[in-house]
């Protein structure tokens, strides 16, 4: 796989009945279509078609060892793809009852008769499943009538898109269409819980907090980030150590930013001293310190600071400290990966 794709006309579809029907038609015929979910915009292709899934990897420049999440309209459809009997299946149903539709992905053993292509799961014996929330994406998936693989609709490793405009900024002319459902409400990707072993593990924090999950699961084990040099296959998306990264280098937990840095602020910028100067380039995630608002504004903020900071000749992005509790765990996870050293990942 070369990581290139032929230029094509990308349709921008409205979130009307005709627009949703057109997006579903393209997907059913092997197309690649970006669409909004409550988390971020996904780049969709039929999970049942290895050829369609390969187009996702090509368009994104994504390494084929990095598995994808399959999205379906209902929990019944999801569990039809899972093994009929595995140790944590009862817990999987409990979590589905509590959080689906919603920003939770479950990694479970694959059913022997699963329709999902091995290209989706990178050859693993487990699959990642999600039932997203929202009328538009639910209608789309119901019309498609099959699982849809959908990683974030951006070039691999870059900042995830939370609007249709963000998608087109990176992928216009490379995909068949984008279904414009407006800004994503949550703004960070789904939480991923691995239920394929003997104990549940949190693979990626996201839109469902650890605290909410542990009310059902009990204490969750955590999976460390997969180093980019590691040969072990990740079990789910978002585990590579460098990910969600703007072009400008990101520095974390900065209380006294340098003059050549843009600032990703949290809370009252006056508390940041020099960051409050009139000519400072600042994007405040939430002046009131609201973590939900901060999550919804994270990727738009990184994109703005990266684009405008580059234009102004700045040298980096300084991130103010963000609390680690609740959605703060997901925010800090994404920012840690955005700040990680970047190494080239081969695309096979």
Image (tube, helix red, strand yellow):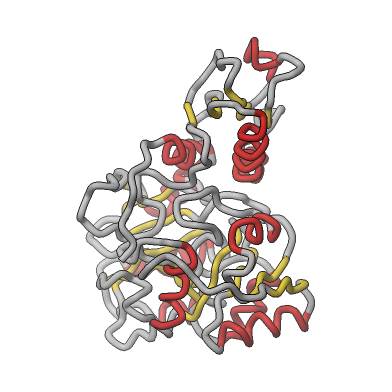
The C terminus - image quarter: bottom left
Residue 227 sits above or below residue 237 on the image: above
Residue at the image position 56 percent from the left and 15 percent from the top:
258
Nearest the viewer among 155 and 293 is 155
Q: Residue 276 lies in what quarter of the image? A: top right
The N terminus - image quarter: bottom left
Residue at the image position 60 percent from the left and 37 percent from the top:
306
Q: Give residue 107's position: percent from left, percent from top.
A: 36, 65
| Figure disc tally | 0
Nearest the viewer among 307 and 122 is 307
Residue 219 seen in render:
no
Residue at the image position 62 percent from the left and 65 percent from the top:
133
Nearest the viewer among 275 and 98 is 275
Residue 131 sits above or below residue 200 on the image: below
Nearest the viewer among 121 and 4 is 4
Q: Give residue 11's position: percent from left, percent from top.
A: 70, 74
Residue 152 shown left or right of residue 288 in the figure: left
Which residue occupies the extreme left position in the image? 231
Residue 253 sits above or below residue 113 on the image: above
Q: Give residue 311's position: percent from left, percent from top.
A: 66, 34
Q: Give residue 103's position: percent from left, percent from top.
A: 54, 58
Residue at the image position 29 percent from the left and 43 percent from the top:
224
Residue 214 seen in render:
yes
């Amino acid at each position: 796989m070369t990581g290139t794709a032929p230029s094509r006309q990308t349709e921008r579809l409205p979130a009307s009945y005709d627009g949703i029907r057109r997006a579903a038609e393209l997907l059913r015929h092997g197309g690649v279509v970006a669409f909004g979910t409550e988390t971020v915009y996904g780049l969709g292709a039929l999970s049942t078609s290895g050829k369609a899934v390969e187009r996702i990897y090509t368009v994104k420049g994504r390494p084929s060892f990095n598995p994808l999440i399959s999205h379906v309209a209902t929990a019944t459809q999801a569990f039809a793809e899972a093994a009929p009997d595995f140790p944590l299946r009862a817990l999987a149903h409990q979590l589905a009852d509590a959080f689906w539709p919603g920003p939770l992905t479950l990694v479970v053993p694959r059913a022997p008769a699963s329709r999902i292509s091995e290209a989706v799961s990178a050859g693993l014996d487990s699959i990642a499943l999600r039932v997203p929330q929202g009328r538009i994406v639910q209608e789309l998936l119901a019309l498609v009538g099959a699982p849809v693989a959908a990683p974030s609709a951006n070039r691999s490793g870059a900042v995830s898109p939370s609007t249709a405009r963000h998608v087109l900024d990176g992928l216009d002319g490379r995909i068949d269409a984008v279904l414009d459902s407006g800004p994503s409400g949550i703004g960070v990707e789904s939480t991923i819980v691995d239920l394929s072993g003997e104990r549940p593990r949190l693979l990626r924090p996201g839109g469902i907090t650890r605290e909410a999950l542990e009310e059902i699961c009990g204490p969750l084990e955590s999976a460390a980030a997969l180093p980019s040099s590691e040969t072990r296959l990740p079990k789910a998306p978002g585990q590579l150590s460098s990910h969600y990264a703007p072009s400008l280098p990101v520095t974390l937990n900065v209380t006294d930013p340098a003059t050549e840095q843009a600032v990703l602020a949290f809370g009252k910028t006056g508390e940041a001293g020099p960051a409050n100067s009139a000519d400072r380039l600042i994007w405040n995630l939430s002046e009131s310190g609201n973590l939900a608002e901060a999550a919804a504004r994270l990727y738009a903020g990184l994109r703005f600071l990266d684009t405008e900071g580059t234009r102004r000749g700045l040298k980096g992005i300084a991130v103010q400290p963000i609390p680690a509790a609740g959605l703060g765990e997901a925010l800090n996870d994404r920012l840690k990966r955005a700040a990680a050293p970047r190494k080239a990942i081969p695309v096979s």
